[in-house]
């Protein structure tokens, strides 16, 4: 199970219907309470200018999304996070306002799963109730994959306990107090990332231009295997994997 569902926008109606509805509401209000802030010719000119800008923006957004090979249809799942073109000026893509970090992690998991022939059973979680419902569906899968970021960050222990109670292996991004009972963790240390961020912040406070600093990524990924959990789950960890581990908890 993942910590988010397939990247689909939760819309109440197709966007064109929403836009036309707002336009219709504006026309109705104008008919009921007419105002004349602008002359008719100026109002038409401003309206046409806004319309043209909107069409140009829509065409640019469609082109950027098409080049990224991800659907613009909000009823279809996205495949990549689009951050160039007009999207670089917005916090997130047009129809998905969720945290970008787990969405990027989910996209990477989908690519890996496709290459390995693994089927992902995804669950969207935005609050504790969603997590509870998602964990009740663990029987649908063979393992639990926790992707960092979003609301799940404060509930790793509960997720791992639920997986262990069903004798399912769980995998998380790094070993912390809250993930210590997971079967396996693999990723950058949160402590190292914090230290790395502190070094960058120190440079900025000393006068460096943030825009001139290179983007830094973690240089070390740590693999930790918990053999106590493996034994409780009845799982035999291959010796080849144990040899590659940075730390083995016995």
Image (cartoon, grey):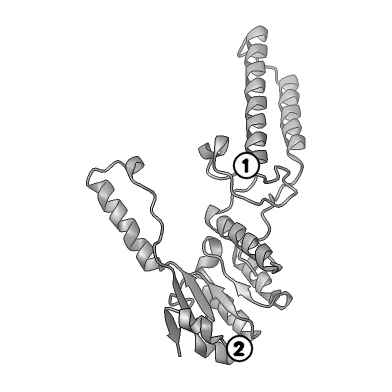
The disc label shown at residue 94, or none = 1
Q: Earlier in the sequence, mark 2 or mark 1?
A: 1
Quarter of the image that includes the C terminus: bottom left
Q: Residue 180, image x and y in percent?
A: 47, 80
* Mark 2: few/some/many CA within 10 Å (<14, 14-19, 20+): some
92 to 158, vertically: above or below: above
Q: Residue 69, image x and y in percent?
A: 67, 45
Q: Residue 83, image x and y in percent?
A: 54, 43
The quadrant in which residue 32 appears is: top right
Question: Mark 1 falls on what kind of element?
Answer: loop
Specify whether 206 is left or right of 3.
Answer: left
Q: Which residue is mark 2?
A: 235
The quadrant in which residue 102 appears is: bottom right
The disc label shown at residue 16, or none = none
Spatial distance from mark 2 to mark 1, Cα to Cα? 43 Å
54 to 75, vertically: above or below: above
């Amino acid at each position: 199970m993942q910590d988010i569902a397939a990247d689909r926008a939760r819309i109440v109606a197709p966007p064109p219907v929403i836009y036309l509805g707002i336009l219709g509401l504006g026309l109705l209000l104008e008919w009921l309470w007419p105002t004349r802030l602008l002359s008719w010719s100026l109002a038409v000119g401003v309206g046409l200018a806004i319309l043209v800008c909107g069409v140009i923006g829509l065409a640019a957004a469609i082109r950027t999304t098409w080049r990224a090979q991800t659907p613009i249809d909000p009823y279809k799942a996205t495949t990549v996070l689009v951050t160039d073109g007009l999207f670089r000026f917005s916090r997130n893509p047009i129809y998905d306002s969720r945290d970008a970090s787990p969405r990027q992690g989910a996209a990477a998991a989908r690519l890996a799963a496709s290459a390995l022939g693994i089927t992902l059973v995804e669950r969207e979680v935005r609050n504790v109730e969603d997590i509870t419902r998602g964990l009740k569906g663990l029987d649908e899968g063979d393992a639990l994959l926790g992707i960092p970021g979003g609301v799940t960050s404060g509930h790793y222990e509960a997720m791992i306990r639920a997986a262990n109670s069903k004798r399912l292996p769980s995998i998380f991004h790094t070993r912390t107090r809250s993930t210590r009972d997971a079967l396996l963790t693999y990723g950058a240390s949160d402590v190292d990332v914090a230290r790395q961020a502190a070094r960058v912040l120190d440079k900025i406070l000393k006068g460096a231009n943030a825009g001139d600093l290179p983007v830094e990524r973690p240089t070390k990924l740590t693999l930790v295997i918990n053999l106590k959990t493996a034994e409780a789950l009845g799982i035999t960890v291959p010796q080849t994997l144990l040899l590659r581990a940075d730390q083995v908890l016995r």
